[in-house]
Image (cartoon, rainbow, N blue to C red):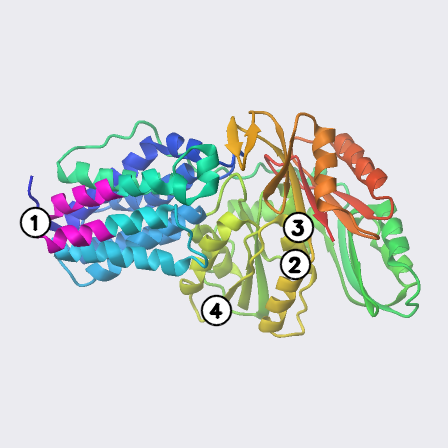
């Protein structure tokens, strides 16, 4: 078979076939993930990312111009990118689009150059490119394509050479990545790219790659009723200390006796307070014994929640883009109604629904940025696998708005970053302060293994409890108490440390309090507070400062 040129219609067919190949093999890709937690896995992320472009192509007529089709694909992939694997896939196609710009069709040399440009775009976006990943596989495929084009190959033969080189590079990924070697698997993202090239070849042969099942859609959080809000008033203020010897621990203990979601952060000059209660006057009265108050804010959460439900049903909630009315705004990613509430109370303007179990797309994050009427918007991805998608919004935001992505890789880091924010200083100073705050918090979590796996030399059975410190497995246990004890040993509590326990949707308040008592017994001098985060998959998230 000889195919000398590819135009817009052909390239659209190639993308559609590639999307079907990834969707049909999504489960296989997910199972290649060495980390056994049911997170937003590679197969799901790549499928939803490339599926966004396939859906866009299916919604209207296809241009004959390769430039037009490639641009549409790149734009759709960029906005639909989910997780690191999805973002890298979108960058591979974005680079191709740049090379195809202004071209009605491509011959073999141009197609090979486009593949190479895509690889360069992907490598350029990753801060610390690692070998033994999709980057390696795509680079070897592009190099093979260039060599084939130089030897006079047509596009079909070129892609055959590229596909063979990709498979060879994929087979070598375990020898380049120790984690893959221990688990005896190849790189999931690299395997996904091999499926893309297989889809390209199938389309050029005139084959139809039929979808075996419909693509998954992101699931929204379940709504909770307004009546479920136990404490109605969210109260925040600063205390300018007059008695610097008086311990803020006493204030914290009092606030916990009249409410929940207590946050008390202090230094020698001020105490920053946040509390939910039914009587904010009592909180203020007690606080006055510590010093004078400023920046007092009291909001009725029941009224806010009712308004939120109304707004949710009446989209759009705000003009897109919103005209600037203030200097700073915040977008935070969170999974679980309780965690969303925590970030909202700390000052987040918009919450993107997502996290470990479902990585939001670049478009999801961009939409919330656009809704905020601020000149500078800080974005807290709160997950390492979401940061790259968040960073893609920087070049997409309109109206001269500035986006600053704070590299928060966990919920505790996000909370700590927001607590360090000072509206009176510059965005550069705030960004630096938030990064410093991230470095002072240790994140822990307890979840379960979704499948049998070998991870970093550990034999893991489905259902085992996994204790993680800063995202890395620190212990594998059979019981919850063992998991908690192992996590506490890994994270520590420190003298006079502040430990916050966020419990998930599958944990009762009684069980959470039992774990809190276990923490207090191990670290009797630490402040321990309990918050209903409502997060899925992760039984407990621990913040230690």
Residue assigned mark 1 = 4
* Mark 4 residue element: loop
The boundaries of the magenta stretch are 143-165
- Specify the label residue 439 is tagged with: 2
Residue 161: in magenta span: yes
Q: CA distance from mark 3 to mark 1?
A: 55 Å
Q: Is residue 485 magenta?
A: no
Disc nearest the viewer among 2 and 4:
2
Q: Residue at x 42, y 40 (%)?
A: 42
Question: Which residue is drawn at the image coordinates 83% and 48% (left, top)?
Answer: 526
Q: Does 378 sit above or below residue 497?
A: below
The residue shown at (63%, 42%) is 337
Q: Residues within 10 Å of mark 2 (few under 14, many from 20)?
A: some
Sequence-first disc among 2 and 3: 3
Q: Quadrant of residue 66?
A: bottom left
Q: Residue furthest front?
A: 175
Q: Pointers 2 and 1 in contact (CB under 8 A)?
A: no
Question: Do tag 1 and tag 4 residues touch (Cβ < 8 Å)?
Answer: no
Report whether residue 74 is seen. Answer: no
**Location of residue 461 with respect to 192 vertically, above or below:** above
Estimate how packed mark 4 is, as few (under 14), some (14 to 19) or many (20 or more) residues with alpha carbons within 10 Å.
many
How far apart marks 2 and 1 lie (CA) works out to 55 Å
Q: Is residue 73 left or right of residue 543?
A: left
189 on left or right of 232: left
Looking at the image, how many numbered discs can be counted on the residues?
A: 4
- Which element type, helix, strand or loop, lies under badge 3? helix
**Numbered mark located on residue 401 in the image:** 4
């Amino acid at each position: 078979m000889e195919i000398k040129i590819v135009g817009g219609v052909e390239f659209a067919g190639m993308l559609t076939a590639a999307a079907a190949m990834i969707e049909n093999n999504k489960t296989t890709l997910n199972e290649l993930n060495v980390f056994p937690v049911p997170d937003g896995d590679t197969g799901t992320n790549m499928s939803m990312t490339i599926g966004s472009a396939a859906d866009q192509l299916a919604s209207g007529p296809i241009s004959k111009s390769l430039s037009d089709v490639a641009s549409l694909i790149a734009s759709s992939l960029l906005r639909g990118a989910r997780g690191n694997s999805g973002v890298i896939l979108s960058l591979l196609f974005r680079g191709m689009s740049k090379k195809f710009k202004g071209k009605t069709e491509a011959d073999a040399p141009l197609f090979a150059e486009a593949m190479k440009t895509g690889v360069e775009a992907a490598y350029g976006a990753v801060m610390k490119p690692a070998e033994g990943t999709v980057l390696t596989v795509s680079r070897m495929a592009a190099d093979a394509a260039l060599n084939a084009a130089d030897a006079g190959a047509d596009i079909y033969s070129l892609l055959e050479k590229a596909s063979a080189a990709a498979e060879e590079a994929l087979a070598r990924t375990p020898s380049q990545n120790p984690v893959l070697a221990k688990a005896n698997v190849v790189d999931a993202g690299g395997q996904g790219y091999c499926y893309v090239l297989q889809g390209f070849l199938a389309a050029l042969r005139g084959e139809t790659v039929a979808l075996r099942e419909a693509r998954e859609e992101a699931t929204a959080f379940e709504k909770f009723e307004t009546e479920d809000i136990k404490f109605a008033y969210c109260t925040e203020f600063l205390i300018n200390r007059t008695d610097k010897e008086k311990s803020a621990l006493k204030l914290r203990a009092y606030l916990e006796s009249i409410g929940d979601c207590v946050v008390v952060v202090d230094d020698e000059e001020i105490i920053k307070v946040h509390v939910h209660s039914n009587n904010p006057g009592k909180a203020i009265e007690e606080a006055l014994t510590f010093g004078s108050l400023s920046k007092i804010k009291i909001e009725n959460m029941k009224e806010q929640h009712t308004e939120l439900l109304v707004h949710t049903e009446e989209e759009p909630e705000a003009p897109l883009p919103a005209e600037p009315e203030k200097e700073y705004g915040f977008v935070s990613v969170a999974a679980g109604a309780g965690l969303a509430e925590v970030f909202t109370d700390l000052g987040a303007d918009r919450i993107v629904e997502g996290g470990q179990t479902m990585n939001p797309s670049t478009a999801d994050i961009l939409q919330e940025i656009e809704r905020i009427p601020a000149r500078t918007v800080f974005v807290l991805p709160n997950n390492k696998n979401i940061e790259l998608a968040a960073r893609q919004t920087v070049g997409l935001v309109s109206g001269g708005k500035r986006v600053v992505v704070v590299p928060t890789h966990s919920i505790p880091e996000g909370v700590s970053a927001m607590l360090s924010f000072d509206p009176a200083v510059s965005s550069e100073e705030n960004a630096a302060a938030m990064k410093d705050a991230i470095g002072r918090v240790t994140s822990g979590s307890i979840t379960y293994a979704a499948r049998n796996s070998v991870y970093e030399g550990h034999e893991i059975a489905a259902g085992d409890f996994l204790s993680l410190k800063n995202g890395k497995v620190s212990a594998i246990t059979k019981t919850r108490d063992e998991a908690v004890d192992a996590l506490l040993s890994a994270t520590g509590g420190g003298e006079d440390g502040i430990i916050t326990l966020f419990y998930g949707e599958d944990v009762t308040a009684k069980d959470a309090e039992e774990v809190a008592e276990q923490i207090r017994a191990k670290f009797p001098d630490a402040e321990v507070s309990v918050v209903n985060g409502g997060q899925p998959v992760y039984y407990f998230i621990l913040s230690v400062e």
